[in-house]
């Protein structure tokens, strides 16, 4: 799956040049003109990065930047590249202080914007994998989310994934997982663990088909890379 770049820009001509440059460089893009549509897209599509204009018909791009960094949306770490006609130093400072990752003033080179997008994603961790696509474990509520979406897990699935998440990058043997999750209720040994891992992977793939955070270590067990753990 290609990284999704959300372009929030009310000028269609500018959005079209950005779309062409970004898709040529291998990105998927979605263009919206209003902050309301941008908020809806952030909730539904989980973009890898937002190219965000400051001056929009229904408000300021600074508002969305502030909301994301303040935790008003599930995914607070989406990288943001501010895009605006304003070139005054105070506007650049405001954007960066609010948590924007970079700032480009119009007029600009679409190619430069695309290169900056690549740089931001590389810095934040492989097209957003590190910053945006992580597990979030809430032991009090007994809930686990992935890429900002809650997982519908059966009891054993929750306990199995919880055990792996509490030991990031550590290889957990099938025997250890069986003992920790099933205890005296274990039914059929290693195959029970493998079957539940397969089900977990399917549920994760349903959210992000391009990611496989559960690693299999032949003859040893399973682990989850620490980069996926919030």
Image: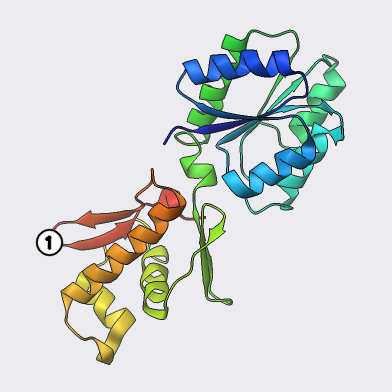
- Residue 175, placed above or below residue 165: below
Q: Residue at x 29, y 65 (%)?
A: 197
- Residue 153, placed above or below residue 99: below
- What's the coloring here? rainbow
Q: Nearer the viewer, residue 6 or 93?
A: 6
216 to the left or right of 34: left
Residue 3 is situated, as x and y percent measured from the top left of the image, at 49, 33
Query: Based on the displayed image, in which of its 4 quarters is residue 35 positioned?
Result: top right
86 to the left or right of 230: right
Q: Nearer the viewer, residue 159 or 28?
A: 28
Q: Residue at x 87, y 35 (%)?
A: 58
Instruction: Label 1: state its secondary structure.
Output: loop
Q: Nearer the viewer, residue 58 or 99?
A: 58
Q: Residue at x 48, y 43 (%)?
A: 130
* Residue 212 seen in this snapshot: yes
Q: Residue furthest bottom?
A: 184
Location of mark 1 (residue): 219
Residue 95 is situated, as x and y percent measured from the top left of the image, at 78, 30
- Residue 120, placed above or below residue 221: above
* Residue 115 seen in this snapshot: no
56 to the left or right of 208: right
Q: Residue at x 61, y 48 (%)?
A: 44
Query: Based on the displayed image, in which of its 4 quarters is residue 18 positioned?
Result: top right
Q: Mark 1 packing: few (<14 Cα in 10 Å), some, or many (20+)?
A: few
164 to the left or right of 40: left
Residue 119 is situated, as x and y percent measured from the top left of the image, at 52, 23
Residue 1 is situated, as x and y percent measured from the top left of the image, at 41, 36
């Amino acid at each position: 799956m290609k990284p999704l770049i959300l372009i929030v820009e009310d000028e269609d001509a500018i959005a079209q040049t950005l779309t062409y440059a970004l898709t040529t460089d291998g990105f998927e893009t979605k263009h919206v003109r209003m902050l309301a549509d941008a908020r809806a897209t952030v909730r539904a599509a989980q973009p890898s990065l937002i190219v965000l204009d400051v001056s929009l018909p229904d408000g300021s791009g600074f508002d969305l930047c502030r909301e994301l960094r303040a935790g008003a949306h599930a995914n607070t770490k989406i990288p943001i590249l501010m895009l605006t006609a304003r070139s005054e130093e105070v506007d650049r400072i405001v954007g960066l202080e609010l948590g924007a990752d970079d700032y480009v003033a119009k007029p600009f080179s679409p190619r430069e914007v695309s290169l900056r997008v690549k740089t931001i994603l590389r810095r934040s961790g492989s097209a957003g994998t590190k910053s945006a696509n992580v597990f979030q474990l809430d032991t009090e509520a007994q809930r686990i989310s992935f890429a900002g979406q809650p997982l519908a897990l059966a009891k054993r699935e929750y306990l199995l994934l919880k055990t792996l998440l509490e030991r990031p990058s550590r290889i957990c043997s099938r025997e250890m997982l069986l003992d920790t999750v099933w205890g005296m209720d274990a039914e059929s040994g290693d195959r029970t663990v493998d079957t539940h891992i397969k089900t977990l992977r399917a549920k994760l793939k349903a959210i992000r088909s391009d990611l496989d955070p559960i690693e299999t270590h032949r003859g040893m067990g399973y682990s989850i890379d620490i980069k996926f753990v919030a």
